[in-house]
Image (cartoon, rainbow, N blue to C red):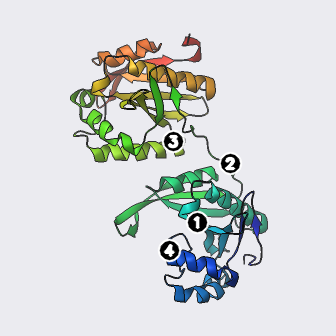
Amino acid sequence: MFDADADIATERLVLRSFGPHDERRIRSIVEARVPFLPPGAPGHLSGVRQWLTHGVHELHRSGQGRHLAMTDAEGRIVGAISLFKTSWGAGTTEVGYGVHPLHRRRGYATEALRGLTGWVFDTTALRRIDLTANLDNLASLRVAQKAGFTWEGVLRAAVLEDDGPHDLVMFGLLRGDSRLPSDTLPRAELSTVRLLLRPLAEQDIPDLAATGADPLTQAGTGVPRGYTEDDAREWVAASERMRLRGHGAAWAATDRTTGRLLLSLDVRDVDWINRTCEVGYMAAPWARGHGYTAEAVAAVARWLFAERGFQRLRLRAAPANTASLRVAEKAGFVREGVERAALGGQDLVVFSLIPADLP
């Protein structure tokens, strides 16, 4: 069994068992209806004392896990983290966590998760820790990635919530894993004389939808036909999941004066061993013909080469897409040839850029 008396200290937190001395804090949390306490926590004030003396400890008494309070330097409960579904014979357990809304975005969940998983491997013979998170819960996906968990797959429609079924991402951490975050591109902001490139955000959805539905965009890219705001919303979320998995990153290139979206740009198919990737873009109808796309592509290329150590950037465009061919040439790419039937049976011209091509 897990040691019920052991406290786990991290840089800013102490993970410890709940107890009767927490009654005042738990009563205030229950009264405020803040949903971050472990499963089985009381929904009414009348159940708080019983939960703290008995209910919260049932998981440990069964040998299947342990509920812990995350406390900060002042001793306040700022979150909770649990081990559960422990199989001592198989050597596995699962972890879950929650942070008080007033204390989120401070890295507490990642810190607690790293501290708890380290303690498990240091003090038990368990060999694997599972973690699941809703596919649309980007904050929790980031926590798992930062804590060194490996994204292993998606369980489709695995949980049923008030708004319907949700997909679950399955993560795993093995005893021999490095516990370091996997390779990813950071959420970087880049700037040029005319542009600010920042991560895609909810505010970009209307302009992304208008751009994706534009006839020229539909003809020259592989975006969904009849592009809508739902498609744009999914792309914003999918681009962050792509980044978290180490597969790429996406930016909104906006006018530095007005802030309006001028184009979206992404790098994809990242090969971390050889440090190569491909760039793609989608220019808004109101931004075409001003050289914004080439300016944005060149900025991302310089950042990839100078700051991230990449060695090659690929760009592909349909032979009939003269605007995209001009983007490649203006950004300094070298034409290499034609990739036959590369996109829905259509040929694509292949360009590349390497550090030596930059001025």
Q: Position of residue 176 (x, y in %)?
A: 71, 54
The amino acid type found where label 4 is placed reads Ala
**Mark 2–mark 3 distance (CA, rounded to whole Å):** 16 Å
Query: Is residue 91 in sight in this rendering?
Result: no
Question: Rounded to the nearest whole Å, what is the CA distance between mark 2 and mark 4?
Answer: 36 Å
Mark sitting earlier along the chain (2/3): 2
Which is nearer the eye, 218 or 298?
298
Mark nearer the N terminus (4 vs 1): 4
286 lies left or right of 187? left
Q: Secondary structure at mark 3?
A: helix
Badge 3 or badge 4: first in the primary sequence: 4
From the image, which quarter does the N terminus lie in?
bottom right
For marks 1 and 2, the one nearer the N-term is 1
Circle 2 sits on which residue?
Answer: 180
- The alpha-carbon separation of the residues under discs 4 and 1 comes to 19 Å
As drawn, 167 above or below 312: below
Determine whether label 1 and label 2 are within 8 Å by CB.
no
Mark 3 and mark 1: Cα distance apart in space: 23 Å
Image quadrant occupied by the C terminus: top right
Residue 243 numbered tag:
3
- Amino acid of disc 3: Arg
User: Where's residue 211, x and y in %?
Assistant: 29, 33
Q: Going 59% across and 63% down the picture, which residue do you hit?
A: 130
Question: Which residue, given by chain and number where applicable, does mark 4 sit on?
Answer: 32
Residue at the spot 37% in from the left edge and 32% down from the top edge? 261
Badge 3 crowding class, 10 Å Cα cut-off, few under 14, some 14 to 19, many 20 or more, is: many
For label 1, the SS is: strand
Q: Position of residue 18 (x, y in %)?
A: 67, 78
Determine which residue is flagged by label 1: 97
